[in-house]
Image (spheres, grey):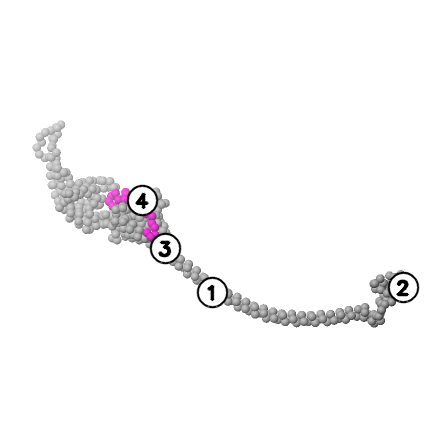
Amino acid sequence: MGVVHEYFKEQPVYALSEITKSIQAVVNRNYNKAYYIKAEILKLNFYPHSGHCYPELVEKEDNKIKTQLRAVIWASQYNSINERFRQITGERLKEGINILCLATVEFSPQYGLALYIQDIEPIYTLGELAKNRMAVMERLKSEGLFEANKKLVLALLPKRIAIISVETSKGYSDFMVTLNSKKKLFRFETELFPSVLQGDKAVANITQRLAEIEVRKEQFDCVVLVRGGGGDVGLNCYDDYAMAQRVATFPLPVIAGIGHAVNETITGMVAHENKITPTEVAYFLIERFQQFADTIATCQQTIAKQTKSILQEQYFYLDKVAQNCQMWASQTIGSSQTGLINLIEILKRETKQQLGNACLNMDHLENKIALLNPENILRRGFSMTLFNGKALTDSNNVHTGDEIVTLLHEGEIRSLVE
């Protein structure tokens, strides 16, 4: 290790440079080639001015850092590595992703131990993402949560919408522009809950916004989670168990629009509705209102048609009744006229007969009366005795000396009773 110049407590004292040079020699001797190393990028530490990148790599166990080591990507290699990574994964190198890198292990007496990265395999990162997604998916299914949010009933007209996005996001802009395009027909009430939409902070941020919405859940019909599209790496936060579990168990229907057609995240899978883009989410909500409006219009047409049909049937019925009434009235009047004529004839006949009978009776009575007329009786030789101007029918009604008058057909005789 070199010449020892001094001792302390009988132990040799070494200069720091001697130790670091010794370590450097050991590292150079034992790590003399490039190795494939898998790790997670905790911090990227890219410096645009120099173009160099100094990632902090970690290995975690139970979500805790088990090992940590500094890495170096020189500017001459960083651009090509980053561009290839972007072409394959759809995202540039970033924090929070697992990588498989080809690197040499080097120790510098001035800067210490570091991994000097020569290349990064994008396919490995995609595979790690897929493996994580599968594990999260199976866990949600085993816990019976995968279909939980889908089982909620979405309001017939989801008018009150809580939106998790960021105002500067193109996805949010597309969503609002499309939704407001039908403002004259349908009116939506929206409230934005701003959130980070990607990276390590996205999980905590979005779940926090969901917690805020849940406190006020009575004020909303659904939650919309929208952002622009991106590569699989940019969307890996939406495959996080904590976020997917929060969406799956949320008490309101969640409608996701967090990527393009090629993107499929677990958060989107467990949401009540998973649309390709934010614009499609807006169209979905508008379609709910349009279907309802179409149903109302159809009902109106059906009611009008049925009403017209019923009125026509009633008109036909009433017209038929009127015709029947007219016919019945004509028949009845005709029958009544005939009956009346017959009745008049009967009355005439009966009246004539009754009058004839009455006349006969009258003649008979006249004859009787004529026979009983005192003049006719006197003419036949009979006489009538009067006492005090009244007919005398009982001799006991007169006394000696009373004057009586005897009427004859011609004249009268006055006599005194003896």
| Disc 3 to disc 2: CB gap under 8 Å | no
Q: Decide which of 283, 251 is in the foreground and name it.
A: 283
| Closer mark to the observer between disc 3 and disc 2 | 2
Secondary structure type for disc 3: helix
Q: Dot 2: few (<14), some (14–19), or many (≥20) neighbours within 10 Å?
A: few
Pick out the residue farthest to the left. 3
Pick out the residue farthest to the right. 418
Residue to which mark 4 is pinned = 210
Q: Which of marks 3 and 1 is nearer the N terminus?
A: 3
Q: Can residue 154 be seen in this view?
A: no
Q: Where residue 286 sits in the image (x, y, percent)? A: 33, 53
Mark sitting on residue 293? 3
- Location of residue 270 with respect to 332 vertically, above or below: above
Measure how far apart labels 4 and 2 are at the Cα level. Answer: 152 Å
Q: Earlier in the sequence, mark 2 or mark 1?
A: 1
| Closer mark to the observer between disc 1 and disc 4 | 1
Measure how far apart labels 3 and 4 are at the Cα level. Answer: 31 Å
Q: Residue at x 30, y 42 (%)?
A: 208
Q: Decide which of 27, 102 is in the foreground and name it.
A: 102
The quadrant in which residue 377 appears is bottom right
Residue to which mark 2 is pinned = 416
Q: Residue at x 15, y 46 (%)?
A: 78
Q: Where residue 217 sits in the image (x, y, percent)? A: 35, 45
Q: Judge from the rendering whether residue 407 lies leftward or rightward of residue 303; answer left or right.
A: right
| Closer mark to the observer between disc 3 and disc 1 | 1
Q: Where residue 220 sits in the image (x, y, percent)? A: 35, 46
Residue to which mark 1 is pinned = 316
Measure how far apart labels 3 and 1 are at the Cα level. Answer: 34 Å
- Location of residue 55 with respect to 413 vertically, above or below: above
The amino acid type found where label 2 is placed reads Leu
Q: Which residue is drawn at 81% across and 70% down?
A: 376
